[in-house]
Image: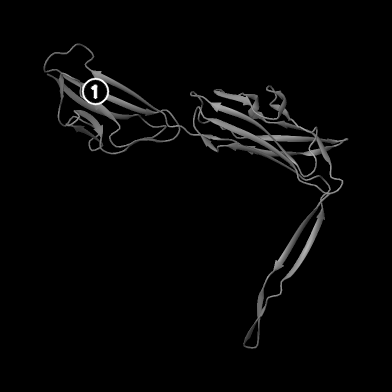
Amino acid sequence: MANITNIAKVDQYTYNVGSTTKTIATPIFSQVSNKFTDPQISFTKVCTPAFSDLNETVTITYRVENIDNATGSPVISTIQIVDPFLTESIPFIDIAIGSNIIKYNQTTGTFEILLSDGSLTPGNSVEATFSYVVSPGFDFTQNLTTTATASFNLSPSGTLPARFSSCGSMIQNGTLDIVKTATPTTAVSSGSVISYIITITNIGNVPSTIPVGLFVDPIPAGTEYIANTISPVGHLVYDSTSNSITNANPLTITNNSAPYTINFSVRVL
């Protein structure tokens, strides 16, 4: 087994001899060591990317490294991992098996990592992967971070203490929904006024921004815009060149808030 060694060192120091400052540039150090009686095993769970949108693929990588390569270090014969995320108990999440996965049990979220040589010898590592996609309808308040537990059997016999690692990609989405209504909804005649209400709602979990000029609502043929009926004033304007309503400033539509409402009216010619 390997030792855990720690060295404390002072590279340089000074002190005064009378009015003279003396510099000692010869390093001093002290070292202590502890014998590590268990095999040194590293286990990590990494979610890539850390932030993702709906309908994007997230990869989960489980990595085990048999760090201890000293003479007589143990050989790992099996690696079993349990991760609650893999039970697919969260709605609107589709999980796919990636690489080096065997004996996957969806009910328990358990699998074994395939060891191509039949074991994981000292100084070597192995990775296994799953991927998943989050679909529209997902509850953005749902926490996707879970802790995976890795357990190990040794060859020819014995076990190791379990190792733990956590990760979870943060889903961020700013999908906008737009609804337009007109008043009246009945038939109109020349001289009638039609008032429009447009509501834009952020149904995601992060703010969205509509750049300048990218909200466009053309004035319908057979009508004319009624001056000074636009609201909110200053953010929306009537563009006489294109005969349309557009945004003069960026429009930030926040999530978890009331819809952004736009109003204007036209007169039937």
Most extreme residue toward the front is 117
The location of residue 185, given as percent across then percent down, is 23, 14
- Look at the picture and state if 211 lies above or below 5: above
Identified at 29% across, 22% down, the residue is: 180
Relative height, residue 151 to residue 32 (above, below): above
Query: How did the renderer colour the structure?
Result: one colour
Residue 68, horizontal then vertical, whole percent: 79, 47
At x 34%, y 24%, the residue is: 178
How many numbered circles does the render carry? 1
What is the three-letter code of the residue carrying label 1?
A: Tyr
Please state, as top left, top right, bottom left or bottom right, where the C terminus lies in the image: top left
152 relative to 245 in the view: left or right: right
4 versus 240 height, above or below: below
Q: Give coordinates of residue 8: x percent, y percent.
A: 72, 64
Q: Bin the neighbour count of mark 1 within 10 Å (Cα to Cα): few under 14, some 14-19, many 20 and up.
A: some
Q: At 17% across and 23% down in the image, what residue appears?
A: 266
Q: Is residue 129 found left or right of 184 in the rendered image?
A: right
Outermost residue, top side? 187
Disc 1 designates what residue? 196
Residue sitting at x 20%, y 29%: 242
Point out residue 58 in the picture as x, y percentages from the top left corner.
57, 32
In terms of secondary structure, where does tag 1 sit? strand
Q: Classify 18 as above or below 238.
A: below
Q: Nearer the viewer, residue 26 or 123?
A: 123
Instruction: Give the quarter of the image for residue 87.
Output: top right
